Amino acid sequence: MGQFARETAIEQIGDNHFRGVLCEGWRIGAVPNGGYVLAIAGRALRAALPHKDPLTVSAFYLSPTGLGPIDCRVELLGSGRSTSFAEVKMYQQGELKVKVTAAYTDLDKLSGETWSADDRPQYPAWEQCVPPPDKGLEFRDRAEMRLVSGADVFNRGTPDGSGAFCGWVRHSDGADPDVIGLLMFADAFPPPVFTVFGPVGWVPTVELTVQVRAHPSPGPLQVRLASRFMTKGVIEEDGEYWDSAGQLVAISRQTAKVRLRKD
């Protein structure tokens, strides 16, 4: 069992009541990464529902979480032959922290036409890319990243104005990705707004949606995370994730608030 699997493990406490533990190693500053928190909810949903693969999962972050136990209470909203629907409310010390709604399915049984307006991007291999400086970021102990664009903002302090980060990500212990891991990786890259204003300020997540399309093959994931519009401090982040076999395995959209430091 890899580190991610151990540190997102849950136990059943009661009927549709599960408990996980938010562990050290996954924090951005003092707060556990939102994708990591979402992965624990994903495991609770998998345990409670007849279908075991996330199809689409949306989280609203009501209040920052902290280290320690977190309770997940699952409410089944409906279930059909191919899809189950549910809601998870995540509590710490009796306070509602995160609310998640989801549809689960069996990804291996999906069928139908396939189409894409964009080709898979072509990146230099993982081994040819240099990791960005971690700047003491605890989360980088768990999710290892290699950038192929946007790195100058960390290496030289020079934003390129692109509004995008492109590169690779994998578990730092070398464990292979799975569909629950995709929920975490969807929040693993730095905010693309850093390529516009530099790595300054605070960019808290309001909502994160992850759509899972396939079980990922072993190896690192290719990522493109981009923003196009910021309005009065609110920004979107759109993510695309391909596995080592070249299949699109997930897409994401995140709503965040940009809080730039004031001199």
Image: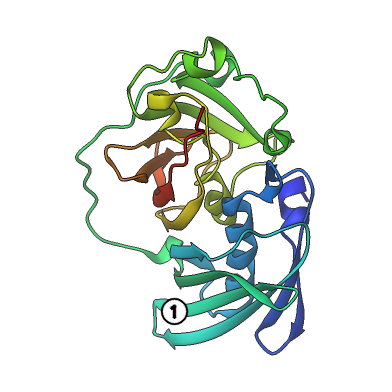
Q: For the point 49% across and 52% down, which residue is it?
A: 205
Towards the viewer: 140 or 218: 140
Q: Amino acid at mark 1?
A: Phe
For residue 33, above or below residue 110? above
Give coordinates of residue 198: x percent, y percent: 47, 23
As drawn, the residue found furthest toward the front would be 263
Where does residue 102 sit, x and y in percent of width and height? 45, 71
**Residue lying at 43% horizontally and 85% vertically, measured from the top left:** 79
Q: Badge 1 local density, few (<14 within 10 Å), some, or many (20+)?
A: many
Q: Residue furthest bottom?
A: 15
Residue placed at 48% from the left, 65% from the top?
60
Q: Nearer the viewer, residue 225 or 216?
A: 225
Whole-percent x, y for residue 31 in the image:
67, 50
Residue under circle 1? 85
Q: Helix, strand, or loop for circle 1?
A: strand
Q: Quadrant of residue 218?
A: top right
Q: Is 9 placed left or right of 111 in the picture?
A: right
Horizontal side of residue 111 vs 169, given as left or right: left
Front residue (pair 83, 38) = 38
Residue 30 versus residue 41: which sits nearer the camera? 30
Residue 145, above or below 68: above
Q: Could you say where residue 97 lies in the image, as x and y percent from the top left?
A: 61, 68
| In the image: residue 72, left or right of residue 158 | right
The residue located at (40%, 76%) in the rendering is 83
Q: Quadrant of residue 27?
A: top right
